[in-house]
Amino acid sequence: MIGVFLDESADDVREWAEGISFPVLVDREHLLADLYAVSNVPTVIWIDADGSVARPNSAEVGTDLFKDFSGITPDKHMQQVRDWVRNGALPDDAAGEVDDLSDAEIEARLAFRLATHSRREGNSDRAAHWFSTAAELAPLDFTIRRAAMPLQGVDPFGEEFFELFGEWREAGSPYHGLARS
Amino acid sequence: MPRLKVLTVDAVSEIDAEFREGRAFTSAAGVSEALGWDLKTEGLCRGDVCVPIRDEAAVLDGDRVDLGGVADLLGMASLLDEEASALAVSAPSADRRAALKDRVAPDFELPDVDGNLHSLEEFKDRKRLLIAFASW
């Protein structure tokens, strides 16, 4: 297992990494949101020993923490992982294809990069401009909308997040990955 | 000569550049420094790979090189912030297509919380579960 946190700094990630034996990496430039078209977290990708993608992006959780909120439980996925590791068995949805990023989603990621750059340079006005641009380009992408919240002093578990979640649900819960079974 | 920060998915480099009509121009050396590709007679080269420049006007203006044009040629999107003197450049779209269409997992290198770099390749020949997460 390799954990990759799409967070601004190691400080944001450190407490989550406590007691974890596998590598926990800090992806502050959201490389995975580009390279693997990750549009929300958690996203799990199965990679085989030969470097092929055995099962692409899917929204799975590791604990029961968000079960009540999202309806996803870890048990089924953990059993599927066990079957794959032990027997090489793949679930039916493993062959599913993930849609590529649209031009707007790619541009949103670039705008987000410019936003975090300005923010790190202490230019919050310029950062706000780019966060806003990114949000307009990819309004239903959580790596753009929700990731920006703590970087702008907004609680990512608060009111603005619930509004975003509502918008997202109303739009049909778009996600770059396998549909939840 | 003004300085431009080029922000790729894994690095920041600062090069000499000038802006003309909303585009950033630099020297061949600047392109090498910022993007890791060298301008040669065969085109844009890195290691054994060369991408020919079929439309010179899209990339060259005298001895100045259009960074956005180069990025485009390499399948990378770019976005210029002239005011902040920064150019963000995406990963090559071919790498993402390899992941999504060809199902070949592109390698990457990132630091852990202690700053030690780790890559996907580090664990090759083993099944891996890549988990994207966040504090948000």
Image (cartoon, coloured by chain):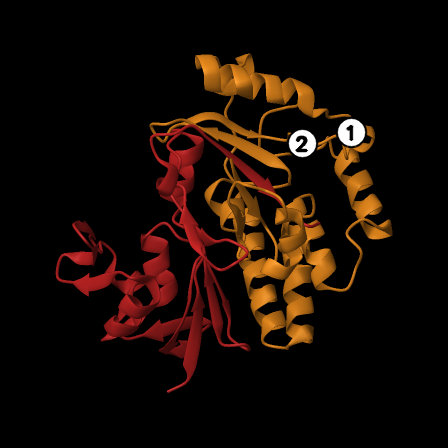
Chain colours: A orange, B red
| Residue B94 position by quadrant | top left
Q: Earlier in the sequence, mark 2 or mark 1?
A: 2
Q: Amino acid at mark 2?
A: Val
Which quadrant would residue B98 be assigned to in this image?
top left
Residue B37 is situated, as x and y percent measured from the top left of the image, at 26, 60
Q: Which residue is mark 1?
A: A67
- Name the secondary structure under disc 2: loop
The chain under label 1 reads A
Instruction: Tell me: A153 left or right of B65.
Output: right
Residue shown at the point (66%, 48%) measured from the top left: A16
Is any part of residue B74 visible from this angle? yes
Image spot of residue A153 (x, y percent):
77, 64
Question: Based on the displayed image, in which of its 4 quarters is residue B131 positioned?
Answer: top right
Residue in the image at 42% along x and 40% along y: B96
Report the number of numbered marks.
2
Label pair 2/1, CB-CB below 8 angstroms: yes
**Parent chain of label 2:** A
Q: Secondary structure at mark 1?
A: helix
Determine which residue is flagged by label 2.
A61
